[in-house]
Image: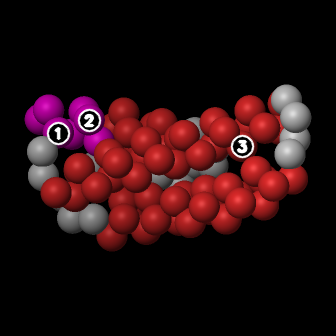
Amino acid sequence: MRPLLRVLDVLSVLETLSVLVLLGNLVTVHADGITSALGPVHGALYLTVAVTALLGRDLQLRTRLSALVPVVGGVLTLRNVRREARR
């Protein structure tokens, strides 16, 4: 796998995990500590995935645009990155 695809793969997994923890926290206990600690981390991961996908070379347009979709962008980017790695 090319280095750019590997970086996007790892970042997308981390972003997806962070949004799942935030949503799980929202649905269950809604602990303010979790939200205040993980919210900025998720925001940074979201922006990192988006900027990396937009500025990365040789990525398909679908991969670039999927990184911009809120909440499910990490999952979509992960799927598209793995599809690109196979080609």
**Count of numbered circles in the view:** 3
The amino acid at mark 1 is Ala
Q: CA distance from mark 2 to mark 3?
A: 25 Å
- Residue at numbered disc 1: 85
- Residue at numbered disc 2: 82
Q: CA distance from mark 1 to mark 2?
A: 5 Å
Question: Circle 3 sits in a helix, a strand or a loop, which is it?
Answer: helix
- Do labels 1 and 2 touch, CB within 8 Å? yes
Left or right: 21 as drawn, with respect to 64: right
Q: Position of residue 9 (x, y in %)?
A: 32, 45
From where the camera sits, is residue 61 visible?
no
Question: Circle 2 sits in a helix, a strand or a loop, which is it?
Answer: helix
- Residue at numbered disc 3: 22
Q: Residues within 10 Å of mark 1 (few under 14, many from 20)?
A: few
Left or right: 6 as drawn, with respect to 18: left
Tell which circle, 2 or 3, labels the residue nearer the N-terminal end. Answer: 3
Tell which circle, 3 or 1, labels the residue nearer the N-terminal end. Answer: 3
Residues drawn in magenta:
81-87
Image quarter (top left, top right, bottom left or bottom right) of the N terminus: top left
Q: CA distance from mark 3 to mark 1?
A: 29 Å
- Pick the residue in front: 29 or 4: 29
